């Protein structure tokens, strides 16, 4: 179901999203080589709880029989891991890694969702370019996230930008509406045809999240039921914000 948020609900969305922004500011300051992905998860969870929010990914049920509930506050995906990497004390990040963190805060019954890809120390020029293009793909997409435009306009802009840089977008996962539920309609693919799909209206809150692969688009799901990696072993990056559709320009709620 597509939900249009009232003024009051937008206020709650803002609060949840502000927590996510604060979590990333904290991680940005503290992340460094030698930490485990579990250490990073703990920073995120503590900050979220300190700010009065609930880590919404913890215990998240995907609804596929046999897939365990998600066990952590964040998804942390390193290098060729694309999304949904499970934080682990055994996974130590090192100089040169790119580390995608994706987390959702639930506050006053509303969700804020964002992802960042952090570069650890000095990374290769190739990795840096991938991370920058992934972030820019989000900004290319939201140029079209305006009243009267369609979801396909956003999707198309993201995909075309990424392809123009010689990279692939992940097709099996997409952005989404967000509100009381972490995942609401509409789905927002990172590729597609302009002029198609739902028309955007003020009061919609959307999580736009380019997932970009350096090499081929194919992905593999690991046996843990969650972690998605690139099939060709090439690097992947992820960048996401929750935005609000307004009468004019979109507002990015998770980037303050
Ligand atoms: N935050 C992710 C998204 O961007 C969803 C993560 S799945 C979960 O949509 F199980 F970790 F919650
Ligand atoms: Co999301």
Image (cartoon, grey):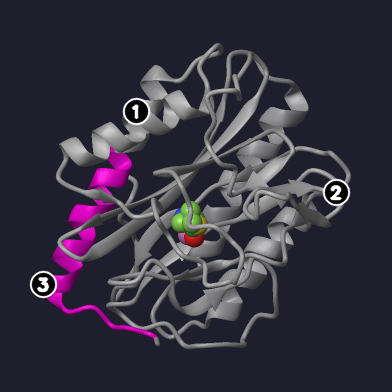
**Span shown in magenta:** 2-22
Against 32, is 152 above or below?
below
Residue 8's disc is: 3
**For the residues marked 1 and 3, what is the alpha-carbon distance in whole angstroms?**
30 Å
The disc, 1 or 3, on the residue closer to the chain's N-terminal end is: 3
Task: Residue at 88% x, 44% y: name it.
Answer: 232
Q: Is residue 16 magenta?
A: yes
The residue that disc 1 covers is: 43
Question: 175 or 63: which is nearer to us?
Answer: 63
Question: What label does residue 231 carry, if any?
Answer: 2
Majority secondary structure of magenta residues = helix
Whether label 1 touches label 3, CB < 8 Å: no
Q: Position of residue 225 (x, y in %)?
A: 65, 55
User: In the structure shown, which secondary structural element does the residue marked by tag 3 occupy?
Assistant: helix
Nearer to us: label 1 or label 3: 1
Q: Residue at x 42, y 54 (%)?
A: 241
Residue located farthest toward the front when viewing the structure as drawn: 66
Q: Is residue 138 left or right of residue 72?
A: right
Residue 176 in view (yes/no) = yes
Q: CA distance from mark 2 to mark 1?
A: 30 Å
SS assignment at label 1? helix
| Residue drawn at (57%, 58%) of the image | 140
User: In terms of image quadrants, where is residue 161?
Assistant: bottom right
Please tell me whether mark 2 or mark 3 is closer to you in this view.
Answer: 2
The answer to whether one can see residue 256 in this image is no
Q: Quarter of the image containing the N terminus?
A: bottom left
Query: Is residue 170 shown in magenta?
Result: no
Look at the numbered discs 2 and 1 and tell me whether their residues touch, using CB distance below 8 Å. Answer: no
Classify residue 4 as left or right of residue 196.
left
- Report x, y in % for residue 37: 52, 28
Tell me residue 226's x, y (percent).
62, 53
């Amino acid at each position: 179901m597509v939900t249009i948020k009232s003024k009051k609900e937008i206020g709650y969305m803002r609060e949840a999203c502000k927590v996510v922004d604060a979590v990333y500011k904290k991680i940005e300051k503290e992340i460094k080589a030698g930490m485990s992905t579990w250490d990073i998860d703990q920073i995120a969870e503590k900050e979220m709880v300190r700010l009065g929010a609930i880590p919404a990914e913890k215990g998240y049920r995907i609804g596929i029989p046999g897939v365990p509930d998600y066990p952590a506050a964040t998804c942390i995906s390193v290098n060729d891991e694309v999304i949904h990497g499970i934080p682990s004390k055994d996974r130590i990040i090192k100089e040169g890694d790119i580390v995608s963190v994706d987390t959702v805060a639930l506050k006053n019954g509303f969700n804020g969702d964002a992802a960042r890809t952090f570069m650890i120390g000095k990374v290769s020029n190739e990795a840096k370019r991938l991370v920058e293009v992934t972030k820019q793909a989000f900004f290319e997409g939201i140029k079209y996230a305006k009243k009267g435009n369609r979801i396909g306009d956003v999707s198309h802009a993201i995909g075309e930008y990424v392809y123009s840089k010689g990279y692939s977008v992940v097709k099996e996962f997409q952005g989404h509406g967000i509100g009381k539920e972490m995942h609401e309609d509409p789905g927002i693919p990172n590729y597609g045809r302009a002029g198609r799909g739902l028309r955007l209206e003020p009061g919609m809150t959307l999580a736009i999240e380019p997932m970009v692969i350096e090499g081929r688009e194919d992905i593999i799901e690991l046996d843990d039921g969650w972690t998605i990696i690139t099939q060709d072993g090439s690097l992947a990056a992820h960048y996401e914000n929750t935005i609000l559709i307004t009468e004019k320009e979109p507002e990015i709620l998770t980037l303050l």
